[in-house]
Image (spheres, rainbow, N blue to C red):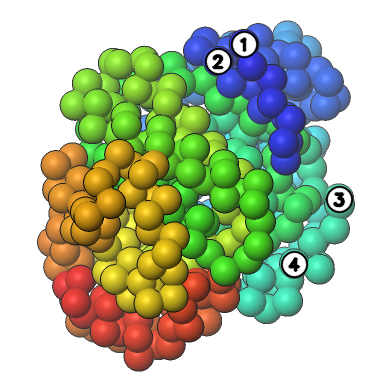
């Protein structure tokens, strides 16, 4: 067992769920948790595994209405249930959507709404105070790293997909048990894995100065590049699953430094609920195009990225990442995901305003993002 304390407490070990959850619920004095998850996990047996691990005196309430991309509407439903059941803490259980939704519920029950008031681009960082209920985050995918992240990305009622950011949104405890990812499909393993890989790359080339984050990002990239194909091809390979969960954790520990244009575009496209686009898969399609765009500003940092990914220095980094995505079965274009020109027109101005655009290493406007997404079409 490894107990890590960087931004938060992290239990990281195979099969650690039961022991860690029992101890941390007691240590945080949570008596009536709201467990936030999705319907798929509810029927998979994994939620029952978590509920069974709770101390006998604990009265848990299940909220399994997490959509594929978390929304303000679903957060409001969860907040109503939290208040109605007199809950005193949160357990986020699932992929990044469930963990982000639990954070949004935490803001609503402690601060009120609307959530737009707490969005980073609306000056909301300073409005989030240290009164959010204690949260335990338990990832069942290896991608977003939301279990150790300070933010949540939520689609608001007005259609914008915005980031809620605050150190007070970092879960009190993360429980990273790679055995929870063994049943993940190849497609989701690939999409979430490329999300983790993108986090490591975008953080490393982001504009902010943060040497510890750079080191963590490169370590995460090494782990992701070495194990993503094996995790996709052989889903029961626990070593590969463990390394991908570590890569996802590292990516989110590092992206306290900031992300960039890939996420700005993914957030803009992902805000359009009629398309139901997977965030990590969007990142995989858009990353090569953004690397080409950013090269004039940070090409000198690409050598470190190539080394971490085990590539020769003469390799074409964007082309190699595109080839990796293809090998693990992900689409190579936005059109293959169902995106059309009208979605790009809506997404481009949202991307320019997204909080992640501020740390992209090369200034990007709505016009730049429109062109990049059109090239990716």
Q: Are circles 1 and 2 on residues that touch, CB within 8 Å?
A: yes
Identify the residue under disc 3.
131
Q: Earlier in the sequence, mark 3 or mark 4?
A: 4
The answer to which image quadrant residue 93 occupies is: top right
Q: Secondary structure at mark 2?
A: loop
The residues bearing labels 1 and 4 have C-alpha atoms spaced at a distance of 35 Å
Q: Are circles 3 and 1 on residues that touch, CB within 8 Å?
A: no
Circle nearer the viewer, 2 or 3? 2
Circle nearer the viewer, 4 or 2? 2
Q: Earlier in the sequence, mark 1 or mark 4?
A: 1
Circle nearer the viewer, 3 or 1? 1
Identify the residue under disc 1.
1
The residues bearing labels 3 and 4 have C-alpha atoms spaced at a distance of 14 Å
The residues bearing labels 4 and 2 have C-alpha atoms spaced at a distance of 33 Å
In the picture shown, does residue 280 fall above or below 40? below
Residue located at (20% from left, 66% from top):
334
**Residue 114 seen in render:** no
Identify the residue under disc 2.
13
The residues bearing labels 1 and 2 have C-alpha atoms spaced at a distance of 5 Å
Identify the residue under disc 4.
125
Q: Which quarter of the image is occupied by the C terminus?
A: bottom left
């Amino acid at each position: 067992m490894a107990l890590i304390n960087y931004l938060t407490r992290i239990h990281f070990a195979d099969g650690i769920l039961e022991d860690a959850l029992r101890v941390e619920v007691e240590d945080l004095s949570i008596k009536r948790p709201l467990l936030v998850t999705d319907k798929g996990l509810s029927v998979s047996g994994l939620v029952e595994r978590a509920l069974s691990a709770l101390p006998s005196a604990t009265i848990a309430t299940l909220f399994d209405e997490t959509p594929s991309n978390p929304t303000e509407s679903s957060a409001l439903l969860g907040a109503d249930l939290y208040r109605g059941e007199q809950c005193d803490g949160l357990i986020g259980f699932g992929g990044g959507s469930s963990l982000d939704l639990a954070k949004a519920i935490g803001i609503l029950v402690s601060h009120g709404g609307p959530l737009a008031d707490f969005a980073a681009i609306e000056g909301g960082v300073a409005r989030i105070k240290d009164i959010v209920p204690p949260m335990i985050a338990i990832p069942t995918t290896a991608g977003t790293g939301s279990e150790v992240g300070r933010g949540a990305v939520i689609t608001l009622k007005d259609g914008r997909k915005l980031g809620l950011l605050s150190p007070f949104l970092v879960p009190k405890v993360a429980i990273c048990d790679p055995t929870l990812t063994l049943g993940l499909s190849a497609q989701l393993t690939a999409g979430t894995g490329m999300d983790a890989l993108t986090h490591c790359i975008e953080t490393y080339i982001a504009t902010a100065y943060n040497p510890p984050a750079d080191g963590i990002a490169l370590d995460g990239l090494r782990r992701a590049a070495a194990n993503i194909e094996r995790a996709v091809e052989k889903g029961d390979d626990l070593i590969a699953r463990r390394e991908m969960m570590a890569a996802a954790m590292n990516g989110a520990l590092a992206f306290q430094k900031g992300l960039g244009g890939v996420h700005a575009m993914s957030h803009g496209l992902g805000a359009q609920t009629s398309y139901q686009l997977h965030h990590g898969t969007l990142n995989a399609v858009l990353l090569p195009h953004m690397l080409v765009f950013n090269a004039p500003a940070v090409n000198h940092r690409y050598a470190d990225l190539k080394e971490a990914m085990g590539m020769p220095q003469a390799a074409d980094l964007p082309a190699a990442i595109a080839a990796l995505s293809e090998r693990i079965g992900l689409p190579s274009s936005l059109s293959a995901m169902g995106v059309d020109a009208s979605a790009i027109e809506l997404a481009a101005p949202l991307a320019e305003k997204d909080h992640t655009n501020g740390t992209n290493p090369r200034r990007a406007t709505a016009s730049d993002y429109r062109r990049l997404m059109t090239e990716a079409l």
